């Protein structure tokens, strides 16, 4: 069985105000492409309520680092009371969304994701010895890469949302 280590635990981002939902999705997709992540959508729910839309989206981008290790980022997005409003910006009317966003980021390092070391108890023992003593430097470097990527994505989205504060 693959080992999954949680490196970043519930890094939160909250925002309330004007933003564009479509541009938020495009910004995240662009970041995934630039960093060579593949995206898997776990949950996508949209409810229309009298106070505005409620959108819940769970995304799990992942990237293989080696044949033995991969990075997974779990992003849980909830948008509350999303309404479409018209705003005048630089003497032009622009349609934006107004509402509240809550995002939670988790970063994982998964090792032996292809279960190559699970065939026999001897292999499991050897893998544990290698992970603890021989590959410790590689694992530490992979853990720091998970942390850097999650924090960079968090900062990118935070910067994007702050563009709409005017």
Image: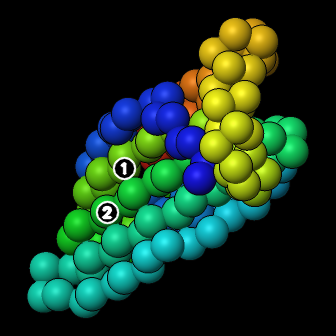
Q: Which residue is mark 1?
A: 103
Q: Residue at x 68, y 64 (%)?
A: 39
- Where residue 17 appears, as percent x and y from the top left, is 30, 52
Who is closer to the viewer here, 136 or 101? 136
On the question of residue 96 being in view, the answer is no
Q: Residues within 10 Å of mark 2 (few under 14, many from 20)?
A: some
On the question of residue 16 being in view, the answer is yes
Apparent side of residue 6 relative to residue 137 in the rendered image (left or right): left
Mark 1 touches mark 2? (CB < 8 Å): yes
- Where residue 9 appears, as percent x and y from the top left, is 38, 33
Q: Residue at x 44, y 43 (%)?
A: 105
Q: Which element type, helix, strand or loop, lies under badge 2?
A: strand
From what the image shows, is residue 48 above or below residue 162? below
Tell me the number on the disc at residue 78.
2
Snapshot colouring: rainbow
Apparent side of residue 10 relative to residue 137 in the rendered image (left or right): left
Who is closer to the viewer here, 146 or 11? 146
């Amino acid at each position: 069985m693959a080992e999954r280590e949680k490196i970043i635990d519930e890094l939160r981002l909250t925002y309330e105000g004007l933003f564009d939902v479509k541009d938020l999705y495009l910004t995240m997709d662009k970041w995934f492409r630039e960093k060579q992540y593949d995206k898997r959508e776990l949950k996508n729910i949209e409810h229309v309520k009298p106070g505005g839309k409620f959108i819940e989206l769970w995304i799990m981008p992942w990237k293989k680092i080696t044949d033995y290790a991969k990075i997974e980022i779990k992003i849980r997005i909830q948008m509350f009371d999303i309404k479409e409003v018209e705003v005048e910006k630089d003497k032009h009317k622009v349609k934006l969304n107004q509402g509240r966003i809550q995002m939670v980021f988790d970063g994982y390092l998964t090792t032996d994701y292809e279960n190559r070391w699970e065939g026999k108890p001897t292999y499991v023992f050897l893998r544990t010895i290698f992970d603890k003593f021989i590959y410790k430097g590689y694992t530490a470097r992979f853990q720091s890469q998970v942390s850097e990527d999650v924090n960079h994505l968090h900062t990118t989205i935070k910067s994007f949302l702050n563009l709409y504060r005017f």
